[in-house]
Image (tube, rainbow, N blue to C red):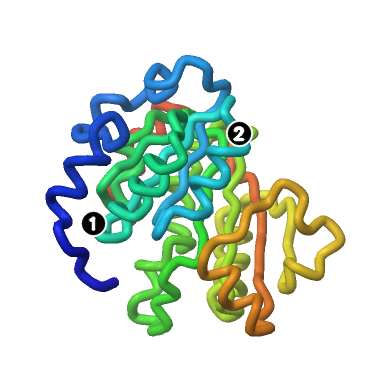
Amino acid sequence: MRKKKNLKSRWATVSSGRLAEDPAQYRGRWLSLYPPAKALFVELGCGKGRFLCEWAGRRPDILFVGLERTPEALLMTMEKAAARGLHNIRFISGDAAAICDLFAPGEIDRLFVNFCDPWPSNKRAKRRLTHRNFLRLYRVVLRPEGELHFKTDNRPLFDFSVSEVEAVGAQLLRHSVNWHDDPDYPGEDVMTEYEEKFSSQGVPICRCVCRLADGTTPEDSENTAGTA
């Protein structure tokens, strides 16, 4: 992503009240930041923010948290949230590998992973956000009935991800290699920038929804952080 002009000044303008400067302090009490919220939805790699902001606009009863490590992308997302006057959205500048340090066991109701880097080299498979090491971390922070929603245009990555879901013994609730032609589309779904671009070019969008819970206890889960 290109460098943004006046990034520091623009960041200062929109980050107050939206960016969690010390996110670990909210671990276990994220919902306290927005009392009307009945649930916590988190997106890993929120990019330019269309998906997250659209969701937040539709569901004022939910607190949304976007995790993004690229400052330029995070700035664009915060500016979108500010322009739309969204109060039920917070942001974290950080990495998905630290998710267990940011959220308490069973704290997240839904986790979104959209169009993540496929890391095509097998040597870098562990960097994929759907690798089993990451899935085990997500299992910790998702509540037992919580769901992981994953979308990509990359079929090899999707096939890999489904196999990883199966490898950790998770429950695959939905599975589609052409989501936009699926009978359930669109339902409550929202398109990302990448999704709109690729689907307009005729590229099939793959999507799966899974439930990762396997009886892991909060005591056991504390020991899984950092395995990714």
Which residue corresponds to the image point at 49% horizontal and 34% vertical from the top-left? 108
Disc 1 versus disc 2: distance between alpha carbons? 26 Å
Q: Earlier in the sequence, mark 1 or mark 2?
A: 2
Q: Which residue is mark 1?
A: 71
* Dot 2 amino acid type: Arg
Asked if 187 appears above or below 47 in the picture, the reply is above
Residue 186: percent from the left, percent from the top?
Answer: 76, 56
**Seen from this angle, which residue lies furthest front?**
83
Query: Mark 1: which amino acid?
Result: Pro
Q: How many marks?
A: 2
> Residue placed at 52% from the left, 37% from the top?
41
Q: Position of residue 185 (x, y in %)?
A: 78, 58
Q: Could you tell me residue 107's position as x and y percent? A: 47, 28
Q: Nearer the viewer, residue 165 or 223?
A: 165
| Residue sitting nearer the eye, 138 or 69 | 69
> As drawn, is 46 to the left or to the right of 153?
left
Residue at numbered disc 2: 59
Please state, as top left, top right, bottom left or bottom right, where the N terminus lies in the image: bottom left
Query: Could you say where residue 133 lies in the image, as x and y percent from the top left?
Result: 41, 57
SS for dot 2: loop
Q: Nearer the viewer, residue 166 or 57?
A: 57
Q: Quadrant of residue 32?
A: top left
Of residue 56 and residue 102, the one placed in the foreground of this image is: 56
Residue lying at 70% horizontally and 54% vertically, measured from the top left: 172
